[in-house]
Every structure is written in structure tokens, then in C-alpha cells.
């Protein structure tokens, strides 16, 4: 198996683990399986309001029935001979569906170690993410399921000054 395949499987496994942990810890979220929709991971079952561990950007509440796409990225990632801030990977087709449904992104920054400690997270409307992705879309080749994707550094959405890698999301006061 190539290292590229291993990295993709690892990212997928981390994403699945983050999704499960978030859906279990946020009472207002319920899981949405790929048989129902491949373009979002959860939906709200009740009104969702921001709190210290889950700030909202550009909105004050999320209404019941809103589709939520959960995206995670590492706090830092290798960029050749140095590190750079991690990036959220967005598939255009799924993003367009989330936009059409007035959905939200739940963006999570984590540390790549056992348990995937979360150091930042935020709820952001797909419309705001759409503005941030303008000019970032590129085509992918090969046998991938998506044709066009974009990457967005977490620091373009979440202020790095508020992120302390030694403190997990639930531990901040």
C-alpha cells in the first residue's frame, strides 16, 4: 500500500472518529448516514445555540433540521521541510448541496494523537465558507469521487490567538 493511500485512510478514520465524538457530545445533533445523504454528516434535532466550547461565526442560533457537515483538520501538518497550519478539505459538489440547503459547517481543529484532542471548533454557515473558498477550487484527477475540491487553512476561519494546543475545547474557561 502506498503512503498516499495510508494517509487518506488515516484522514478518513480521523474524520469518522471526530464525527462520532461530536454527534455524541452535542445533544442537538443526530447522525446522518451516507445512505441518506453523502453531503452532510448530521442535522440538528432542536435549536442549537453557541457556548464557550462551540462558538458560532456569522449567526446566533441554528434552527432544528439544519444539515451540518463536520470537517476536521490537524492543528499543524507537514509542508515539505516545515510545518504549516492544517487545512479543511472541501468537495465542491457536497459544498454546493450544503449551500443550497442553507447548511452549516462544524469545523474542528485537533491534535493527531490518540483520542484526537480538539483544540478549536466553530459553527460556520456554508455561505461564509463559500466566500472564503472563492478562487481556491481546483480539479483532482484519477478515480476520486469528487472532481473539484478546495483547501482552507483553519486560521482563515478561527483566530489562532484563541487556540492553545495544550488545552482541549472543553477545558477552556
Image (cartoon, rainbow, N blue to C red):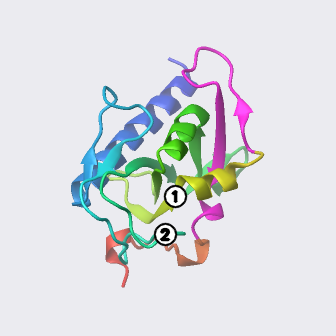
Residue 87 horizontal/vertical position (percent) = 60, 50
Residue at 47% x, 53% y is: 105
* Residue 14 appears left or right of 86: left
Q: Nearer the viewer, residue 106 or 84?
A: 106
Q: Is residue 103 above or below residue 96?
A: below
User: Does the rendering let one see residue 135?
Assistant: yes
Residue at 60% x, 72% y is: 159
Pointer 1 residue: 125
**Range of the magenta residues?**
136-158
Residue 15 horizontal/vertical position (percent) = 41, 42
Mark 2 Cα-neighbour bin, 10 Å: few <14, some 14–19, many ≥20: few
Mark 1 Cα-neighbour bin, 10 Å: few <14, some 14–19, many ≥20: many
> Mark 1 to mark 2: distance in Å?
8 Å
Which comes before the other along the chain, label 1 or label 2?
A: 2
* Residue 71 appears left or right of 152: left
* Residue 37 appears left or right of 154: left
Q: Quadrant of residue 80?
A: top right
Residue 22 horizontal/vertical position (percent) = 31, 54
Residue at 47% x, 45% y is: 101
Q: Nearer the viewer, residue 5 or 70?
A: 70
Q: Mark 1–mark 2 contact, CB under 8 Å?
A: yes
Q: Is residue 93 magenta?
A: no
Residue at 51% x, 50% y is: 73
Q: Is residue 138 magenta?
A: yes
User: Does the rendering let one see residue 83?
Assistant: no
Q: Is residue 93 above or below residue 161?
A: above
Pointer 2 residue: 59
Residue 38 horizontal/vertical position (percent) = 41, 31
**Which element type, helix, strand or loop, lies under badge 1?**
strand
Q: Residue furthest top?
A: 143
Amino acid at each position: 500500500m502506498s503512503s498516499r493511500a495510508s494517509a487518506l485512510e488515516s484522514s478518513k478514520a480521523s474524520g469518522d472518529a471526530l464525527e462520532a465524538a461530536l454527534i455524541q457530545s452535542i445533544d442537538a445533533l443526530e447522525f446522518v448516514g451516507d445512505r441518506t445523504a453523502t453531503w452532510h454528516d448530521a442535522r440538528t434535532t432542536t435549536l442549537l445555540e453557541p457556548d464557550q466550547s462551540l462558538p458560532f461565526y456569522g449567526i446566533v442560533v441554528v434552527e432544528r433540521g439544519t444539515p451540518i457537515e463536520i470537517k476536521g483538520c490537524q492543528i499543524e501538518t507537514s509542508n515539505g521541510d516545515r510545518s504549516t497550519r492544517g487545512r479543511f478539505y472541501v468537495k465542491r459538489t457536497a459544498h454546493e448541496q450544503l449551500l443550497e440547503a442553507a447548511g452549516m459547517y462544524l469545523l474542528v481543529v485537533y491534535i493527531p494523537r490518540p483520542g484526537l484532542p480538539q483544540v478549536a471548533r466553530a459553527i460556520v454557515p456554508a455561505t461564509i465558507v463559500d466566500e472564503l473558498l472563492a478562487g481556491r477550487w481546483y480539479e483532482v484527477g484519477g478515480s476520486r469521487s469528487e472532481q473539484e475540491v478546495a483547501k482552507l487553512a483553519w486560521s482563515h476561519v478561527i483566530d489562532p490567538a484563541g487556540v492553545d494546543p495544550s488545552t482541549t475545547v472543553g477545558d477552556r474557561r
